[in-house]
Image: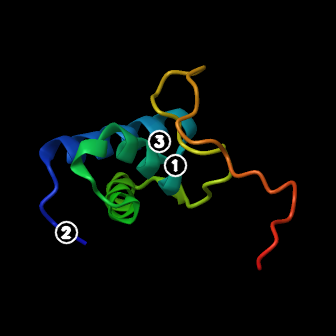
Amino acid sequence: MRYDYSMRLHDDVNAAVERAFKTAGIVNITVTAEQVRIMNLAENVALEDIEYLVLRAAQLLGAAIEFDSMSSGLALSGNVEGEERAISPLVLSQPASIQ
C-alpha cells in the first residue's frame, strides 16, 4: 500500500462516500471503490488501496457499510443513471471447465 495519494483521489473518495451514504444510507465499499478507481485511472491505484480509503471515509462518517460487489452489479462508469456499465457483471450461468 502506498501513502502518497493525490488530493483529487482523496476528494473523489470523500465525495463518493458521502453520495452513497446520502443516497442509500449504506456505503458499499467495493462498488464505491470501483467507481472512484474508474474516475482516477491515470493514477494507477490498486482497487484494494482505494477500498481502504473508502472504508476509512465511511467509518469517519459513521456510515453503515457492506462489502458485496454483486448486490448492484458492478460499478458504473459515472454517477448518472442509464449510463452503460464500464464493467459487465459476472455471469455464472454455465460452469467453466478447468483442465
| Sequence-first tag of 3 and 1 | 3
Among the 4 quarters of the image, the one containing residue 42: top left
| Sequence-first tag of 2 and 3 | 2
Q: Is residue 87 left or right of residue 1?
A: right
Of residues 38 and 64, the one drawn nearer to the viewer in this rendering: 38
Of helix, strand and loop, which one carries label 1?
helix
The amino acid type of the residue labelled 2 equals Arg
Q: Is residue 28 left or right of residue 70?
A: left
The amino acid type of the residue labelled 3 equals Phe
Q: Position of residue 31 (x, y in %)?
A: 52, 49
Of helix, strand and loop, which one carries label 3?
helix
Q: Is residue 47 left or right of residue 93?
A: left
- Mark 2 surroundings: few (<14), some (14-19) or many (≥20) residues within 10 A: few
- The numbered disc on residue 2 is 2
| Sequence-first tag of 1 and 2 | 2
- Mark 3 surroundings: few (<14), some (14-19) or many (≥20) residues within 10 A: some
Which residue corresponds to mark 3? 21
- Which circle, 2 or 3, is nearer the viewer? 2
Which residue corresponds to mark 1? 31
Of helix, strand and loop, which one carries label 2?
loop
